Amino acid sequence: MRLVLIADTHVPKRARDLPAPVWAAVEAADVVIHAGDWVDASFLDRLEARCQRLVGVYGNNDGPALQARLPEIADVELDGLRVAVVHETGPATGREQRCEARFPGRDLLVFGHSHIPWATVTPGGLRLLNPGSPTDRRRQPYATYMTADVVRGALTGILLHRIER
């Protein structure tokens, strides 16, 4: 199962659209995970129309229209992998301990908010992934997104993709 992880797209406020390589990845994926800050419900409609399956949450920049359609936290099982998705996890310091306590029994937590890519594993085995932002790099050298594969409950082939200007 092929995953695409994105967050903090901010379409159309910070970017008019997703970059072409991200749309290509979305269309090739089995599941797209969006960790919040969509900004406009029309972008949610467009993403839903172009992907096989979407798992998404709302973020702090998402108003009532998006909050009515998306949860704050998503919990799914993907080919045996137990996944949680949330927008915000708080400061980087202590993140692993907080997330491990907040999301017990999960294998993967996908989050956003910071626009900073993150990939760690807690002492208890929870993998934390933040794909950064494909449209708003902020203080990062590149805009980014992630891809990964799920094979019989195992997450493999995690790649952080840079989007060239």
Image: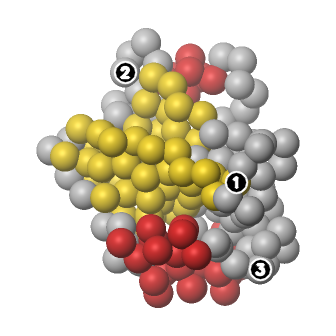
Secondary structure beneath dot 3 equals loop
Task: Give above or below for 6 relative to 16.
Answer: above
Q: Residue at x 70, y 40 (%)?
A: 116
Decide which of tag 1 and tag 3 comes sooner along the chain.
Answer: 3
User: Which residue position holds label 2?
Assistant: 125
Q: Label 1, label 2: how many angstroms apart (C-alpha)? A: 28 Å
Which sits in the foreground, 92 or 156?
156
Secondary structure beneath dot 2 equals loop
Q: Quadrant of residue 46?
A: bottom right
Quadrant containing the N terminus in the rendered view: bottom left
Q: How many marks?
A: 3
Q: Are marks 3 and 2 in contact (CB under 8 Å)?
A: no
User: Which residue position holds label 3?
Assistant: 16
Image position of 105 (left or right of 132): left
Give amino acid for label 1. Ala
Decide which of tag 1 and tag 2 comes sooner along the chain.
Answer: 2
Near mark 1 (Cα within 10 A), the count class, few <14, some 14-19 or many ≥20, is many
Give amino acid for label 3. Arg
Near mark 2 (Cα within 10 A), the count class, few <14, some 14-19 or many ≥20, is some
Query: Viewer-nearest of labels 1 and 3?
Result: 1
Q: Do we see residue 102 in this rendering?
A: no
Which sits in the foreground, 148 or 39?
148
